Amino acid sequence: MKKIFFFILYRLLLRPFLKIFVGVNFEINDAFSKQGQYIIVANHNSHIDAVAILACLPFSMLDKVHPVAAIDYFGKNKISSFLSEFFVNALLVERKCKDEVEEKNSKAIDKMIAYLDRGESLLIFPEGTRGEAGRHAKFKKGIAVLLKSRPQIPFVPIYLKDTGNALPKGDGMLVPYDSYVFVGSPIWINPQSSIEEILTFVETSIFCLQSGSRQI
């Protein structure tokens, strides 16, 4: 039932709305052609980012992908928590961590790993927050820790271009603007790589998509 609800919401309603009225162009390859488990990783400039990515998903994955969101923003009260979890399928976590280098022991990472071990997929924005339109913040190391802990699960890089112009940070009004969702192919990390190497690899995998390349 939940899968059907998300199909109607994201594929039948929101995807056409984003394409026709907002100007979002979806450049999707066969990344999600086979039913499987993924860690989807993307840059972040706008509140429409998660919605646009969810609108890319095939029917089989719609109820299995959980955008990881900050509980202090999307779960600051019971109503916002309910809306985030019901309409976006969000996984709410604490984004502030005293020691970002050793995030294996953080509650946020443990919660994400628990979801992965249940067979769920995650959507993560490693910048941790929305940046200014056209600018990219430094990636947090948590994504590398997560990938290294579960190397059997591939990550799918997604580059979002100009979505920050359609709904800029701090602005509550959608503005029609040509923007793009570039979806890359699934990639498995080398578990022998260091956290820094994995982080650099993930970042490169995402930003190389802006030139139309699918491989690095």
Image: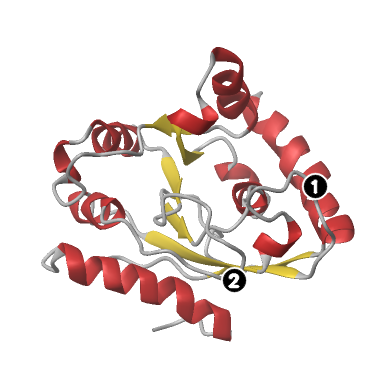
The image position of residue 159, as x and y in percent, is 54, 68
Vertical comparison of 114 with 136: above or below: above
Crowdedness of circle 1 by 10 Å Cα count: few (<14), some, many (20+)?
few
Q: Residue at x 81, y 44 (%)?
A: 12
Residue type marked 1: Met
Label count reads 2
Residue 190 visible (yes or no): no
Going by the image, does 165 lie left or right of 214? right
The image position of residue 42, as x and y in percent, is 49, 60
Residue under numbered circle 1: 173
Q: How far apart are marks 1 and 2 (CA)?
A: 18 Å
Residue 211 lies in quadrant: bottom right
Residue under numbered circle 2: 134
The image position of residue 93, as x and y in percent, is 38, 32
Quadrant (top left, top right, bottom left, bottom right) of the N terminus:
top right
Crowdedness of circle 2 by 10 Å Cα count: few (<14), some, many (20+)?
few
Secondary structure beneath disc 2?
loop
Vertical comparison of 32 with 124: above or below: below
Q: Which residue is drawn at 20% across and 35% down?
A: 106
Residue at the extreme front: 170
Going by the image, does 175 lie left or right of 184? right
Q: Nearer the viewer, residue 154 or 42?
A: 42
Q: Tell which circle, 1 or 2, labels the residue nearer the N-terminal end.
A: 2
The answer to whether mark 1 and mark 2 are in CB contact below 8 A is: no
Q: Nearer the viewer, residue 8 or 14?
A: 14
